[in-house]
């Protein structure tokens, strides 16, 4: 997503002008536009003109319209967003208050204005407009003495670091210099991973090389992680996937990503964070039901007791046409984060998101048991 301009007031009102550049951006736009917002974009309108002789002719004209959003429809096959509403600005072709539908498409500029921009919407703009925020795949392509550390977004590959080390050749009966050079090189690559890969965003790291370089590097890296107590590497060990690459040059990454077997493995690994959280929730529901709850009322009670460790929430809830309702979910997300909890926003385009929607779209894993929540809920239903 390309950010053209943003203008916000102190009271939270304001507008942004954006250009969607790929299909992922259209999904972001769908999550940003809400009923009650005003949307400005170019559109084609059929205009009928009547001549002095009484004959009429119709032609299609391109014009810029600003509408007050009433209805939103997202076509995920065509990656098009249809937004219906009433015209709220003077236009020579469309009367004030007349209904019109704007089609938002890739590479077409639009301006979105809201009375109040909440933190979830602002985070989504930052995520969509900063390529490193959408890069949920990392890659380390290497050979002896050469490595490229990359971030892969849906639309491009960003080279974050190129590492070149001179490694002495092996000599008969004297390999010490070669081994020392190799360790220095592996250490530099490990430091590069720690510096350039944000494991909060990156869900999978491909490590590719010809021969056994990738295996030796991964073995060295995790040995050092244990020695130096590098928890970030140990906690994310499952995200590293070793693959064969023809060389350590960046063009080898294209070969890896075009391999269907790797693509399937990537899809599983990328969604694994959400799937793992949902599996953990279901498991907790069976073994410790007092630490797993779903539904707004129960989760609000748990949040008041500072008990939420992980909040699972569907992005569908932020698209509610009821502004008050939407604010309830936004406030809940902010509150959980402030209390040190983790928030996982599930996409309804993924299977895990559909499963969460069957549980009201909202679930939580608690830090400690709260059996009182069940009691409150049952006593409340008795009163009814």
Image (tube, grey):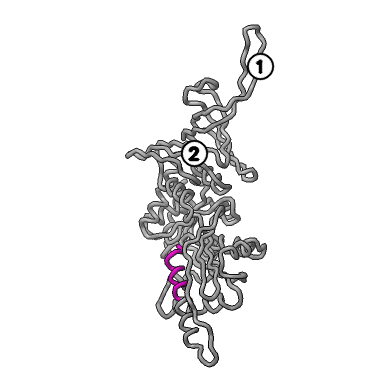
Residue 192 lies in magenta, yes or no? yes
**Element marked by disc 2:** loop
Classify 10 Å Cα crowding around label 1: few (below 14), some (14-19), many (20 and above): few
- Specify whether residue 18 is in view: yes
Identified at 64% across, 22% down, the residue is: 59
Name the residue carrying label 2.
34
Instruction: Identify the residue shown where x is 43% and y is 54%.
Output: 376
Front label number (2 vs 1): 1
Q: Which mark is residue 89?
A: none
- Is residue 45 placed above or below 289 in the rendered structure? above
Residue with the most extreme bottom position: 173
- Which residue occupies the foreground of this view, 152 or 296? 152
Residue 271: name its quadrant.
Answer: bottom right
Residue lying at the far left in this picture: please name it. 10
| Front in this rendered view, residue 166 or 353 | 166
Is residue 233 rendered magenta in the image?
no
Disc 1 secondary structure class: strand
Q: Which mark is first along the chain, 1 or 2?
A: 2
Determine if residue 382 is in view.
no
Most common secondary structure along the magenta stretch: helix
Disc 1 marks which residue?
Answer: 57
Residue 225 vs 309, above or below: the answer is: below
Image: 147 above or below 29: below
Q: Which class describes the residues within 10 Å of circle 2: few (<14), some (14-19), or many (20+)? A: many
Relative to residue 329, is residue 36 depicted above or below?
Answer: above
Across and down, in percent, residue 15 comes to: 42, 37
Q: What residue lies at 51% left-to-right and 74% top-to-bottom?
A: 145
Report the residue at 60% width, 74% height from top. Answer: 210
Magenta stretch?
187-198
Residue 256 located left or right of residue 32: right
């Amino acid at each position: 997503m390309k950010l053209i301009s943003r203008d916000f007031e102190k009271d939270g009102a304001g507008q942004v002008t954006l250009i969607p550049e790929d299909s992922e951006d259209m999904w972001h736009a769908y999550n940003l536009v809400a009923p009650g917002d005003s949307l400005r974009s170019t559109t084609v309108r059929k205009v009928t003109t009547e001549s002095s002789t009484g004959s009429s002719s119709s032609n299609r004209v391109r014009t810029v319209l600003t509408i007050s959003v009433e209805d939103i429809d997202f076509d995920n096959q065509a990656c098009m967003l249809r937004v219906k509403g009433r015209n709220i600005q003077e236009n020579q072709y469309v009367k004030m208050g007349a209904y019109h539908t704007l089609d938002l498409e890739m590479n077409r500029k639009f301006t979105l204005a809201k009375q109040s921009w909440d933190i979830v919407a602002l985070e989504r703009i930052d995520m969509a407009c900063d390529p490193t925020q959408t890069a949920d795949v990392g890659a380390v392509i290497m050979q002896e003495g050469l490595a490229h550390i990359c971030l892969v977004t849906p639309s491009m590959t960003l080279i974050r670091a190129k590492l070149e080390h001179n490694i002495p050749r092996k000599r008969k009966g004297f390999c010490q210099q070669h081994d020392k050079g190799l360790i220095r090189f592996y250490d530099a690559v490990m430091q590069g991973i720690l510096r350039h890969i944000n494991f909060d965003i990156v869900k999978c790291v491909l490590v590719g090389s010809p021969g056994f370089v990738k295996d030796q590097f991964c073995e060295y890296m995790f040995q050092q992680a244990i020695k130096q107590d590098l928890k970030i590497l140990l906690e994310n060990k499952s995200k590293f996937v070793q693959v064969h690459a023809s060389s350590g040059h960046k063009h080898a990454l294209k070969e890896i990503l075009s391999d269907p077997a790797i693509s399937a493995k990537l899809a599983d690994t990328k969604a694994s964070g959400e799937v793992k959280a949902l599996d953990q929730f279901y498991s907790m529901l069976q073994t410790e039901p007092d630490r797993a709850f779903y539904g707004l009322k129960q989760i609000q009670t748990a949040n008041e007791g500072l008990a939420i460790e992980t909040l699972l929430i569907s992005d569908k809830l932020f698209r509610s046409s009821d502004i008050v309702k939407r604010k309830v979910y936004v406030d809940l997300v902010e509150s959980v984060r402030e209390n040190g909890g983790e928030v996982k926003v599930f996409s309804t385009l993924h299977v895990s998101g559909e499963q969460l929607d069957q549980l009201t779209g909202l679930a939580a894993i608690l830090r400690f048991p709260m059996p009182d929540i069940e009691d409150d809920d049952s006593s409340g239903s008795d009163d009814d």
